[in-house]
Structures are given as C-alpha cells and as structure tokens.
Image: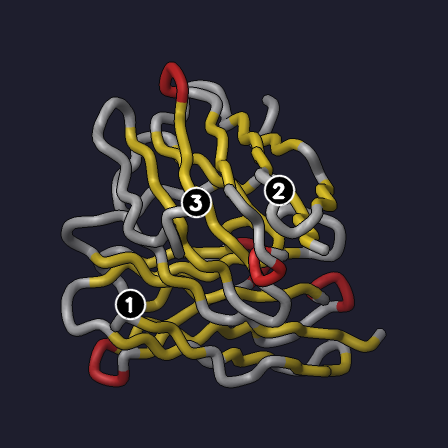
Amino acid sequence: AQSVSQHNHHVILSEAASLELGCNYSYGGTVNLFWYVQYPGQHLQLLLKYFSGDPLVKGIKGFEAEFIKSKFSFNLRKPSVQWSDTAEYFCAVTPGTGGFKTIFGAGTRLFVKA
Amino acid sequence: GAGVSQSPSNKVTEKGKDVELRCDPISGHTALYWYRQSLGQGLEFLIYFQGNSAPDKSGLPSDRFSAERTGGSVSTLTIQRTQQEDSAVYLCASSLAGVVDDTQYFGPGTRLTVL
C-alpha cells in the first residue's frame, strides 16, 4: 500500500537555525509531491509542490524541497527559520497517473523559539 | 474571495446517532475532497468528487460512511450509527480543475466527538 513517512513528529529550533524535515514515500510509479502547512488557528494550505521538471522546488516564505527519485524522498528545507514558521507541516503524495487519492504523512510539528 | 467553508465547526453526538457534515467549496471549483484527521494521525483520504463523474469512494472506512455532492457544489458527508472511533476532525478541500497537480484549498474542518 502507498504510504508517506515523516520521520520527525516534533522539532524544536531556535530562530535562524536551518530546517530540514524528512519525507519518504512508498510508490513505484510517477508521483506528484506536496508540502502543506497549518499555522496555529489557520486552515491547511499549500507550501510547495512538485509534479515535473526541476527536482528542486521553491515555495512560499523561503521554503524549498528536493525530490530525489532514487531515495523516494521529498525533504523540506529552509536555511533560516523564523518564529512565524511555527506550524505543523504535512508531506503528501498523489499518483502521477490515474486517481486523485492523496496520501498524507502524519505531520511534523515545528516550534521555533524566539 | 470566499474560501472553503464547513459546518458545523464542532459536533458532539452520542454513539449510535447519525451525523451530517457539510462542505461548501470555493465557487467554480469542480473537484471536492473529504479527509479525516484523527488525533496524532495524518490526513486520511475518504472520498473525491470531480464534476459529474462517479466519485472515488476508495477511502471510505465502512458502509456507515457516505457522501453526496448536489449540483456540483455543496457536499454532505453522512456517518450513520456513529462509533467512538469516528471521533476526528473532518476536513473538506476543493480544487479548480481536478487534475492531479491541482492545489487543494482546505476548509477549517468539523471536529466530531462521539461520546
């Protein structure tokens, strides 16, 4: 069965620290990959997505993610976090061909200390 | 413009009762999704509607769960004979064209508590 694994359930960082959140998926075919974010008290919203082309994807607020097909990974990175990045981050996968079932990871709660 | 709205925001019910959860997608969005988020879990896909096509019901956990989408707009998720394990946040999302790389826009969710 398809699945998405996020290795860190809770991450605590100080402002200006670098961030990398791991995401691995299990699906052998073409995939579309997403990172969603949920800020405290807000709706889930798209941070960035990959569906083809350059495997290094840039999203909003300075976030980026790199698709490494050989590792089935789509890790999220930010060079210098801010207090306002405190949120829950979800990695998600949709098969690239056929079907619209989106598989989400369990999420990573990031807390950035001011 | 207005985003995805869901009602009620909170619902407390007794075990065995039926509940209906409503989703109003963004106007003009043809695709609509329902997800369930249990405590400490990721989002679990339930069902997907796209235009007038038959819905993808592959994520519905049991026959107690059903959903309708009337007129290609508003959707209702119905849970019959609720069980305590149905307690979760139910999220609705819509997207413009229902293609696989579409951005999904999420509503605020309905928190369901089954006593």
Q: Nearer the viewer, residue A3 or B3?
A: A3
Placement of B14 over or under B1, stated as above or below: below
Chain letter behind tag 1: A
Q: Nearer the viewer, residue B75 or B64?
A: B64
Q: Earlier in the sequence, mark 3 or mark 2?
A: 2
Q: CA distance from mark 1 to mark 2?
A: 48 Å
Residue B4 placed where, x, y %? Answer: 56, 32
Look at the image and tell me in which quarter the C terminus of chain A lies: bottom right
Residue B17: which numbered mark, if any? 2
Q: Nearer the viewer, residue B5 or A81?
A: B5
Q: Nearer the viewer, residue B41 or B80?
A: B80
What element does badge 3 sit on?
strand
Residue A55: which numbered mark, if any? 1
Chain letter behind tag 3: B
Residue B54 placed where, x, y %? Answer: 22, 32
Closer to viewer: mark 3 or mark 2: 2
Residue B12: which numbered mark, if any? none
- In the picture, measured across the screen, residue A95 lies left or right of residue B29, that is left
Residue A80 placed where, x, y %? Answer: 65, 75
Mark 1, residues whose alpha carbon is within 10 Å: few (<14), some, or many (≥20)? some
Q: Is disc 1 on the same chain as disc 3? A: no
- In the picture, measured across the screen, residue A28 lies left or right of residue B32, that is left
Residue that protrudes farthest toward the front in the picture:
B16
Q: Which residue is mark 3?
A: B65
Q: Tell me which residue sits at (40%, 59%) in the image.
A: A34
Q: CA distance from mark 3 to mark 1?
A: 38 Å
Residue type marked 3: Phe
Residue type marked 2: Lys
